[in-house]
């Protein structure tokens, strides 16, 4: 009886020892390579007053003083680890404004610096990006310029209807690529979106695009729940100044391929019957009113191409090549027709 009790006691001791070891191990931080950064790992600060001295100190990294007639405004700061070093970085978003009666938007700047040490002055710069340039000033600021581009098959330029007057510009840190390192998502109300990521030892732009839509905003979304985000960039494409026909509400979808974000609109339009039906209705109404309106033919042909309907894609795109007046539509239609299998 004593022997049996002794065996049971040793068994209980092993269990307790195992639980103790588990608790001790759980108290230690997990290896950084296995951690997924979240919003809780980021400390944000917003600057509501342009003359805030704490925000103004970063202007020293720009062309200082600002060109005559322009001024700088620090909007937002974040502290987080966004590269492959164990130390955190300081990320600061600044804008330049100009104008006498109304301070209009000129350009945005994103500073990436070493983490700040209290009482030590300005941190050391790691990188600086210039983006959303209105073309008002040629700022003499050493840094990387991000050219925000139109998504493929969108041929209109930046929407100028007061876009530079809008001051809503911001950024957020989120791991878009699923590599365990936070990326920088920057968006402006009407100018579009740009994404900066630490790749192959440097900070670089991995996606950008003009965006303007009354119904949608640029967004990142994990469509297949694999921890890697897709990026959706909307654009209202102007057609005819008639109610109900003014815009095609186009959406461009980008996917991360391990190196860059690449267009994959098939995922949006391949099975989107509602979008195709609406587009065909608009086109038919344009035919009744105008006899022909080729931009509709282009986007209908493009959707059929995404859906794998070769015959219908060829029909509409050949019509664009034959009748369209805008060379952008003609050249794009010709490039897609070359990809179709022979009849």
Image (tube, rainbow, N blue to C red):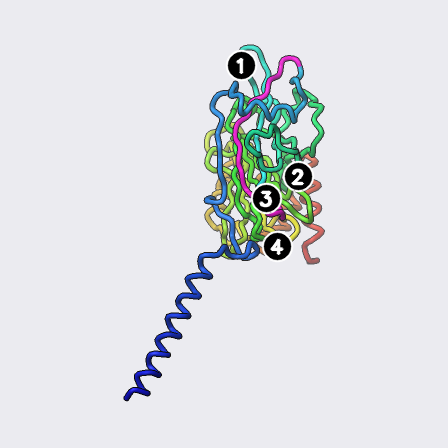
Q: Nearer the viewer, residue 339 or 281?
A: 339
For the N terminus, the quadrant is bottom left
Earlier-in-chain disc, 4 versus 3: 3
Whole-number angstrom distance, CA of label 2 to CA of label 3? 49 Å
Instruction: Return the residue at label 1.
Output: 102
Residue 226 percent location from the top left of the image:
52, 57
Foreground disc of the pair 4, 3: 3
The answer to whether 285 appears left or right of 64 in the picture is: left
Residue 73 percent location from the top left of the image:
56, 22
Whole-number angstrom distance, CA of label 4 to CA of label 2? 19 Å
Earlier-in-chain disc, 2 versus 1: 1
Foreground disc of the pair 2, 3: 3
Whole-number angstrom distance, CA of label 3 to CA of label 1? 41 Å
The residue positioned 67% from the left and 44% from the top of the image is: 333
Instruction: Return the residue at label 4.
Output: 311
Instruction: Return the residue at label 3.
Output: 87
Indicate whether residue 77 is drawn in magenta. yes
Earlier-in-chain disc, 4 versus 2: 4
């Amino acid at each position: 009886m004593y022997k049996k009790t002794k065996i049971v006691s040793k068994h209980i001791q092993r269990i307790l020892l195992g639980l103790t070891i588990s608790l001790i191990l759980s108290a230690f931080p997990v290896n950084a390579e296995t951690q997924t950064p979240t919003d809780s790992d980021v400390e944000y600060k917003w600057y509501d007053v342009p003359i805030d001295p704490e925000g103004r100190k970063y202007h020293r990294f720009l062309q200082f003083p600002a060109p005559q007639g322009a001024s700088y405004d620090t909007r937002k700061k974040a502290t987080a680890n966004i590269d492959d070093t164990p130390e955190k970085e300081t990320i600061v978003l600044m804008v330049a404004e100009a104008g006498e009666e109304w301070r209009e938007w000129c350009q945005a700047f994103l500073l990436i610096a070493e983490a700040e040490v209290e009482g030590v002055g300005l941190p050391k710069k790691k990188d600086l990006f210039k983006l959303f340039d209105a073309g008002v000033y040629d700022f003499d600021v050493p840094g990387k310029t991000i050219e925000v581009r139109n998504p493929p098959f969108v041929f209109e330029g930046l929407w100028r209807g007061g876009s530079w007057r809008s001051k809503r510009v911001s950024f957020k840190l989120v791991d878009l690529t699923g590599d365990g390192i936070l990326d920088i998502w920057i968006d402006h109300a009407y100018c579009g979106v740009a994404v900066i990521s630490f790749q192959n030892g440097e900070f670089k732009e991995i996606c950008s695009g003009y965006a303007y839509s009354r119904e949608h905003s640029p967004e990142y979304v994990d469509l297949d729940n694999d921890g890697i985000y897709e990026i959706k960039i909307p654009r209202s494409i102007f057609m005819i100044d008639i109610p109900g026909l003014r815009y095609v509400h186009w959406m461009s979808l980008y996917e991360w391929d391990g190196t860059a974000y690449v267009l994959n609109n098939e995922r949006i339009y391949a099975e989107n019957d509602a979008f195709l039906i609406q587009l065909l209705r608009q086109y038919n109404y344009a035919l009744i009113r105008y006899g022909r309106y080729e931009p509709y033919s282009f986007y209908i042909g493009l959707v059929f191409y995404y859906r794998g309907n070769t015959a219908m894609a060829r029909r509409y795109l050949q019509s664009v090549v034959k009748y369209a007046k805008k060379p952008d539509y003609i050249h794009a239609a010709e490039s897609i027709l070359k990809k179709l299998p022979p009849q």
